[in-house]
Structure formats: structure tokens, C-alpha cells
Amino acid sequence: MLERLKTKDRLYKLKVGSDDLCPLCGSMSETINHLFFECHFGAHCKTQIMNWLGFQNSRNSAAALLKWIHRYAKSKFQKATMYTAVACLVYHIWRARNSSVWNGHVPAIKHTVNTIQFEVKSRISNLLSKKICNRDMDWFASL
């Protein structure tokens, strides 16, 4: 994310586009931080995914969220699962944003969250090894 995404605020500064409003909520300038942490769509998706993983988190930037995961995940497996969830979250919020820009359709938050949950479980299931402790296996099975 390193400020390289072509958000509407960046394009507007380059005189590309007619406005810099977030295509998901239409109420604020579309910055990376707004799109993923302040916009109702991104914030609700993040909250639901974090709750699904069993964590409460109110971090409002990518750097703060990743630092929090690194510090508070209980095991290497939980850390990897949470990083996978964040990657899927970012991907699907950006995909929803593009759907709004190019197709005029904002997907339902519930559908987006369900898709993220399915992808996280699928990706992690494919990488499970016998070295994972029972506590982590139980945590993952409960998702």
C-alpha cells in the first residue's frame, strides 16, 4: 500500500478525474487510510474479520494494524493467518472500490466478508502442516 495505489485523491491532484470522493461512501476524499480504515465499507469489513478471528482491534492505519498483529498474535500460525486475512481484506476492499468505479455497483459488506472468510480458510487449509500445535488447530477449526 505504501502510498502507491491510484486512489482518487492522488489522481485528482494530477488533474485526472472530476472529483476525489470515495466511490464506496461518496462522503470523503478517497485516500488509502480512508478507503481501508475510515470508510464505513472498509471499517465494517475490518471489524467483522477481526471479530471472526477472535480479536478486538481499533487500529486505524495499515502500519499500526500490522504492528499490532506482530506484537499480539499468540503464535506464528495465528500471525500468518491474520496477515493472510489482512491481505485478503485489502484485496477485496480494493476490488469493491473498483466495482463501484467501473460498474457502478458496491457489493454488500456481508458478501465481501463471507468471501474473505472463505479465502482465508481455503488458503490456510492448503498450507496446514503437522507441526501446528493443537491449540492453533482448535482455534482455526473454530473459525
Image (cartoon, rainbow, N blue to C red):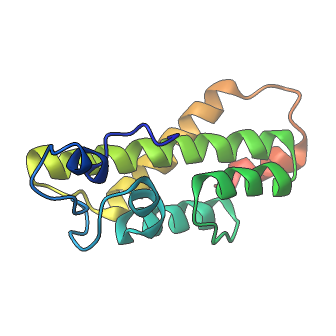
In the picture provided, is 130 more to the left or to the right than 110? right
Quarter of the rendering occupied by the C terminus = bottom right
> Residue 140's x, y, as percent?
71, 48
The front one of 53 and 18 is: 18
Nearer to us in this view, 62 or 100: 62
Q: Where is residue 32 in the image (x, y as percent from the top left)?
A: 42, 53
Q: In which quarter of the image is residue 106?
A: bottom left
- Determine whether, in the image, residue 20 is placed left or right of residue 54: left
Q: Is residue 79 left or right of residue 7?
A: right
Q: Which residue is drawn at 72% across and 39% down?
A: 80
Please state the horizontal and vertical placement of residue 115, each as a whole percent of the image: 40, 48
The residue under the point 85% across, 26% down is 130
Say which quarter of the image contains residue 110: bottom left
Seen in the picture, residue 47 relative to 97 is either above or below; the reply is below
- Residue closer to the observer: 94 or 52: 94
Residue drawn 41% across and 63% down? 34
For the point 34% across and 63% down, which residue is it? Answer: 109
Q: Which of the two residues, 47 or 135, is positioned nearer the viewer here?
A: 47
Q: Residue 19 at what x, y percent from top left?
A: 14, 59
How many numbered marks appear? 0
